[in-house]
Amino acid sequence: MFRYYCIAVGVIIVDHVVKWLVSMYMTIGQQITVIPGVFGLASIRNKGAAFSILEGQLGFFIAVTSLVIIGIMIYLHRVYRENQFLSYGLALVLGGALGNYIDRVFKGEVVDMLQVHFFNFPIFNVADSLLCIGVAMIAIDSLRASRKDRTGIVSPES
């Protein structure tokens, strides 16, 4: 169990170090091209959720995220012995959710900085990235479990 909480804490630390560096060394609105036409950094602040939806609903985000964090921790405690893949995904989601949660509680906004140039996509941060990877892992695990239930074939993880 300890390893999964260490992963979540690691996500929070990396996320906040990057956010701190962007806050210290970039002005709000500044953009830096890292790989022309592909990737860059941009210093923005987001007072909403993903893609700035529901901007200004801080109390709502704090309440919902609190429930999600508690739910993830309870579920992680139930599955960590039987399913490592799912547990790693839950740890990434937990760390990503807590990374942005801390910003919302203490700053009222989230620092975003990662910008993809080759298609129109909102600017995001490290916590968002790792949270999405965790959600993808949870979805893959769910699909594998669903397939196992339908076919009776046991996946390598089970």
Image (tube, rainbow, N blue to C red):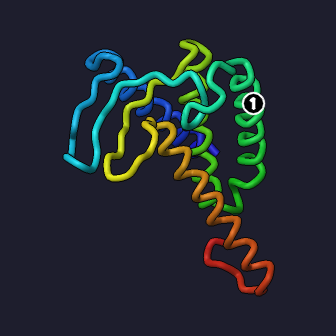
| Image quarter of the N terminus | top right
Q: What residue type is labelled 1?
A: Val
Placement of 67 over or under 1, stated as above or below: above
Of helix, strand and loop, which one carries label 1? helix
| Residue under the image location 70 percent in, 81 percent down | 154
Image quarter of residue 41: top left
Image quarter of residue 142: bottom right
The x, y position of residue 68, in whole percent, is 73, 37
From the viewer's perspective, is 110 left or right of 89?
Answer: left
| Residue under the image location 60 percent in, 44 percent down | 93
| Residue under the image location 68 percent in, 70 percent down | 143
Q: Which of 50 and 72 is in front in this view?
A: 50
Image quarter of residue 13: top left
The x, y position of residue 118, in whole percent, is 32, 52
Badge 1 is on which residue? Answer: 64
Q: Nearer the viewer, residue 76 or 56?
A: 56
| Residue under the image location 51 percent in, 24 percent down | 46
| Image quarter of the C terminus | bottom right
Placement of 97 over or under 85, stated as above or below: above
The x, y position of residue 78, in whole percent, is 78, 51
Placement of 52 over or under 88, stated as above or below: above
From the viewer's perspective, is 17 left or right of 72?
Answer: left
Disc 1 crowd, CA 10 A, few/some/many (<14, 14-19, 20+): few
The x, y position of residue 117, in whole percent, is 32, 46
Q: How many labels does the image show?
A: 1
